[in-house]
Image (cartoon, rainbow, N blue to C red):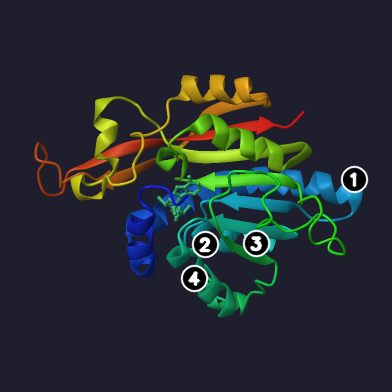
Amino acid sequence: MAPAGNERFNDEAADWDKNPSVQEATRLAFDTLKPIIQTLSECKQSSSGSGLDVLEVGCGTGLLTLRVAPLVHEIVAVDPAHGMIEMLKAKAKISTCDNETDGPRNHNNIVAVCGLLEDPEDPLLPPQDPTNPTGRRRKFDLILSHLVMHHVPDLKPFLGTLLGCLSPGGRVALTDFEDFGPEAIKFHPPTKLEGVERHGIQAVGIEELMKEVGFQDVKVSIGWTLNKSVEYWRDNKPGDTLGFPFLVCEGVRP
Ligand SMILES: C[S@@+](CC[C@H](N)C(=O)[O-])C[C@H]1O[C@@H](n2cnc3c(N)ncnc32)[C@H](O)[C@@H]1O
């Protein structure tokens, strides 16, 4: 079943990348995640000679996906909103590059999937063995998810699905804004609260939930702070901004 708010993301897909705050949040997420990805990638290269297999859940238009892709072997990017996935597919095809001197980048290692992932054995995911397309689904070295958890109605099954999508020893690095108190509601303008299940993620709560679901070596820390306009709230005035801390939630599949 499509989640509440799916309509919203289909409607917003075409203009998603034009929002400077979304771009800034992605830039800060990538700066924080890059060293984690590079370290894992070096470990995998030295142990098996290949790069990382990554799953990104709630990839949207692929702002993070396109940055991560050059660092990994393959990234499977999943989102339930088809409008978002169509944008990602279009961008991946035209070989966007952030810096013109880099020349066109190869995005052949992005697999874009439209669907709501609720089962690690969902046939939407690529098969582990390409010669057995209906067999067991692929397991991943790393799962990323940025600005998604606050839209997920029930985080326990969501985390359980992510755990089931990991290879043994694989890890998650999930980023979302923190529920730091009543002002966290101001992350979204009052007109964009459709599909928002919670006003950020509580650090202690998510750490306990990740352990309960079965993750090991759970670490929840503040990765960065995003300054964002809150002028659309009645008790604020034009030009007002607020700093929103972002959590990086890491855990390992035993
Ligand atoms: C705030 S957007 C973030 C998109 C992208 N990660 C970014 O930072 O630009 C949230 C995304 O999560 C997706 N989403 C909503 N509910 C979801 C769920 N239960 N599981 C996975 N993705 C979901 C939406 O379709 C949307 O693309």
Q: Assess whether mark 1 and mark 3 are in contact (beta carbons under 8 angstroms).
A: no
35 is higher (above) or lower (below) than 103? above
Point out residue 154 in the picture as x, y percentages from the top left corner.
47, 33
Q: Earlier in the sequence, mark 1 or mark 2?
A: 1
Query: Which residue carries the number 2 mark?
Result: 62
| Res 235 quadrant in image | top left
| Residue at horizontal 79 percent and vertical 48 percent from the top | 42
Point out residue 16 in the picture as x, y percentages from the top left corner.
37, 63
Q: Nearer the viewer, residue 151 or 237?
A: 151
Query: Which residue carries the number 1 mark?
Result: 47
Q: Earlier in the sequence, mark 1 or mark 4?
A: 1
47 is higher (above) or lower (below) than 97? above
* Res. 86 mark: 4
Which is more foreground, mark 4 or mark 3? 4
Query: Which residue carries the number 3 mark?
Result: 69
Q: Earlier in the sequence, mark 4 or mark 3?
A: 3
Residue type of the residue flagged with mark 2: Gly
Badge 3 density bin: few <14, some 14–19, many ≥20, Cα 10 Å: many
Badge 4 density bin: few <14, some 14–19, many ≥20, Cα 10 Å: many
Callout 2: SS: loop
Quarter of the picture containing the C terminus is top right
**Disc 2 to disc 3, C-alpha distance:** 10 Å
126 is higher (above) or lower (below) than 253? below
| Residue at horizontal 70 percent and vertical 67 percent from the top | 109
Residue type of the residue flagged with mark 1: Ser
Callout 4: SS: helix
**Disc 4 to disc 3, C-alpha distance:** 17 Å
Which is more foreground, mark 1 or mark 4? 4
Callout 1: SS: helix
Residue type of the residue flagged with mark 4: Glu
